[in-house]
Image (cartoon, rainbow, N blue to C red):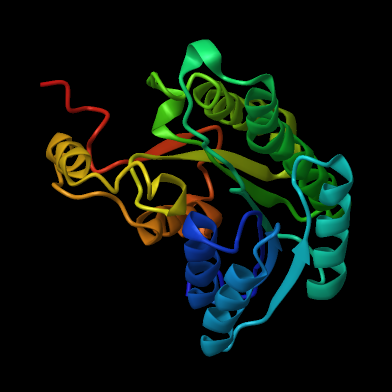
Amino acid sequence: MLLEGKNVLITGASRGIGRATAIECARHGAAVALNWFKDREGMEETLAEIARLGRRAVEVEGDVACPESAERFVSAAAAALGGVDVFVSNAGICPFHAFLDTPIEVFERTMAVNLHGAYYMTQTAARQMRLQGTGGVLIAISSISALVGGGMQAHYTPTKAGVHSLMQSCAIALGPYGIRCNSVMPGTIATDINREDLADPAKRAYMEKRIPLGRLGEPRDVAGCVVFLASDLARYVTGASVLVDGGLFVNLQ
């Protein structure tokens, strides 16, 4: 029960890594506030899982790319739960597209959700934590793509590098308030985002062969790392990034 008594806010919590993180935090004793957008069915499934664990959950719909969504989410969560202890910036999109003909709207939407949304949300959460005066934890879900390129991801990889850099800067800016800031870098995690890309058996087998642990990641693999960083076990960890990739990044042979 590493998060007993903590209030954890998570963006993009209706599916994938966000849902797994919400469930794992609840399993470790946290009350959770969940942001979602245009996925009522997914949100209801997440809420049902948390209810089965006997933990409290509140949900607020909102597009993270809109600055006003951050204030609405954080203020509603703080009012309902009594404060904000941990904030997980997870919401993101990854529409694969060739670089040379990527439409402007695809580039701008990816930047708006993945990077601008992370900035708005973490800034607003940090302001709430400073107001409370008891410190807190900010965790951003970056990606292995912050460290390596992708031919179909030139509009995506810069956003994840930006999220990683954002947490490094926040660690410096917010350390005096007792707020720890870290990023998690998932490798190839099987979620709805890459379901189509991994539907090809040959592509999936190729990806698995490159991973030393021999399998694709699952959302709960990332969630466990988030719980650790959110807990007091990581009380002296800030400005760090943690790869959760089964060894993919270091496999150069």
* Residue nearer the viewer, 3 or 191: 191
Question: Is residue 150 something one can see in this rendering?
Answer: yes
Q: In percent of the image, x 57 and y 41: which residue is there?
A: 93
Name of the residue lying farthest toward the top: 100
Indicate whether 176 appears above or below 58: above
| Towards the viewer: 51 or 206 | 206
Vertical placement of residue 92 versus 168, above or below? below
Q: Is residue 112 above or below residue 42?
A: above
Q: Position of residue 42 (x, y in %)?
A: 58, 69
The residue drawn where x is 22% and y is 27% is 250
Q: Position of residue 247 (x, y in %)?
A: 22, 37
Q: Determine whether, in the image, residue 34 is placed left or right of residue 229.
A: right
Q: Position of residue 129 (x, y in %)?
A: 79, 51
- Classify residue 176 by image quadrant: top right
Drawn side of residue 73 relative to residue 145, left or right: right
Question: Residue 2, can we see it?
Answer: no
